[in-house]
Amino acid sequence: MDRKIVIAIDGFSSCGKSTFAKAIAKRLNYLYIDSGAMYRAVTLELLQRELIHNGGVDSSNLKDLLNSIRIGFSYDPEKGVYATTLNGKVVENEIRSPEVANNVSLVAAIPEVRERLVELQRELGKSKGIVMDGRDIGTVVFPDAELKIFMTADPVVRAQRRLKELRDKGIDISLKDVLRNIEERDYIDQNRDIAPLRQAPDALVLDNTNMTIEEQMAWVESMVNQLIV
């Protein structure tokens, strides 16, 4: 396929957006950018620097910090997976911890953080041929994306999926706590003042509550084939 497009995927947490986006990128030989991981990486950096206290962020030197940290994505061809890097170090496991999950919406709501990361994301998308997932990709970052997808799923199903991920990584947590975290994040994401989670008017809805990744891929491939001829 000579013509490349931007595929923007938005939706609720733990809908499998990243797994879906990675599969699309691999199938199309596109660059995959996990915008949520970028916000998680910033959150991890702030936590490590002890700049998050009592539900607030010490933003006195935030601008300098944002300009200095390096966030990237490395691809392991042997494992066939992407990993987030922070200042040159792979932090994929660290950014998926409950502590980061509990603070990422707070950090993502900070105007300076969003402004800087949107700049970086738009730079990555200039050459097209990318798949990016997050909360405001089709509404804010790439409002002119050729294909916009809004993903959703039943909250309990999302909590079960997230619980399995955490337990596979050796993190001991209850389904009740995971569900509460997901519901809190849903509320914050939809009600924040800056770039709240919204379905773009021209986005296609994908409810994957009862869909396998193979079924989701068949669906998106039919959509892509209609755009790339």
Image (cartoon, rainbow, N blue to C red):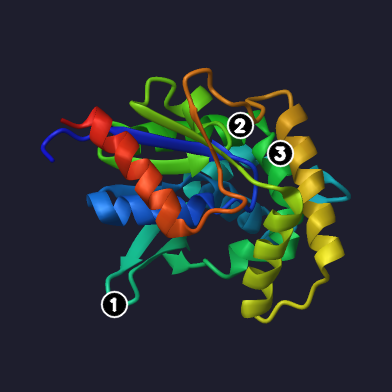
User: Which amino acid type is marked by label 3?
Assistant: Ser
User: Which amino acid type is marked by label 2?
Assistant: Glu
Check residue 60 in the rendering and tell me which mark sits there, or answer none: 3
User: Which residue is the site of mark 2?
Assistant: 112
Sequence-first disc among 2 and 1: 1
Sequence-first disc among 1 and 3: 3
Residue 40, relative to residue 134: is it above or below?
below
Residue 187 in picture, x, y percent from top left: 79, 37
Q: Nearer the viewer, mark 2 or mark 3?
A: 2
User: Which amino acid type is marked by label 1?
Assistant: Glu
- The reply to whether residue 127 is visible in this rendering is no
Please name whichever residue, 169 or 156, is drawn nearer the observer in this view of the structure: 156
User: Which residue is the site of mark 1?
Assistant: 78
Residue 145, relative to residue 125: is it above or below?
above
Q: What residue is at 81 percent from the left and 66 percent from the top?
A: 175
Q: Quadrant of residue 224?
A: top left
Mark 2: secondary structure: helix
Measured in 3D between alpha carbons, the distance from the residue under mark 1 to the one under mark 3, in whole angstroms, is: 42 Å
